[in-house]
Image (spheres, rainbow, N blue to C red):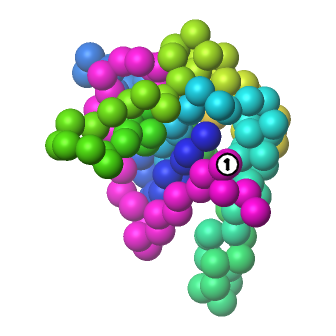
Amino acid sequence: MRAVIQRVSKSSVKVNGEILGQTALGLLVLLGIEDLDNDEDVRWLARKITELRIFSDSEEKMNLNIAQVGGDLLVISQFTLHASTKKGTRPSFIKAARPEKAIPLYERFVKECENNLGKEVSTGKFGANMEVELINDGPVTIVIDTKNKA
């Protein structure tokens, strides 16, 4: 699993002009699932993201996690995070998991984040053409890949 995590002051996702999910202060997570991902990756990444200390404390140091600031979480599926651009100019998505594997892992990831945070997590719509808006706070953007845990 690969995630692009952005600390936001607000974010939203629309499908066909309808807002499906939104946040105030919190995190926007773009989540890519590859064919080799499993439940261990789901648990590890959900814990890592929900415990990530990238919000400022009273001394303006990144020292607080999303729960400590009462932040919201928006998770958007994005298979293009597993694009291979080694050959030519047209990306290959061969490593990205097919929907029959990716959807259950995506749903488990969202549920795991909800369990960790003790509140609902906003989402887009898997496989849909989505319009994502955000105001990146900082800017703070972090990339995490479960294949690089060590």
What secondary structure is found at the residue carrying circle 1? helix
Residue 16 position, x and y percent, is 26, 17
Residue placed furthest toward the bottom: 59
Q: Residue at x 72, y 25 (%)?
A: 108
Does residue 54 show up magenta in the picture? no
Q: Which residues are magenta?
A: 124-150
Q: Position of residue 99 (x, y in %)?
A: 52, 14
Q: Quadrant of residue 116?
A: top right
Query: Looking at the image, is 121 positioned above or below residue 103?
Result: below
State the count of labels: 1
Looking at the image, residue 10 sits to the left or right of residue 51; the answer is: left
Q: Is residue 145 magenta?
A: yes
Question: Which x, y percent locates residue 110?
Answer: 67, 31
Q: Is residue 71 visible?
A: no
Label 1 sits on what residue type?
Thr
Query: Residue, x 48% and y 57% (percent of image)?
Result: 6
Quadrant location, the N terminus: top right
Q: Is residue 78 above or below residue 47?
A: above
Camera-side residue of 70 and 137: 137
Which residue corresponds to the image point at 65% horizontal and 31% vertical from the top-left? 36
Identify the residue under disc 1.
146
x%, y% of residue 109? 69, 32
Q: Mark yes or no: residue 10 visible.
A: yes
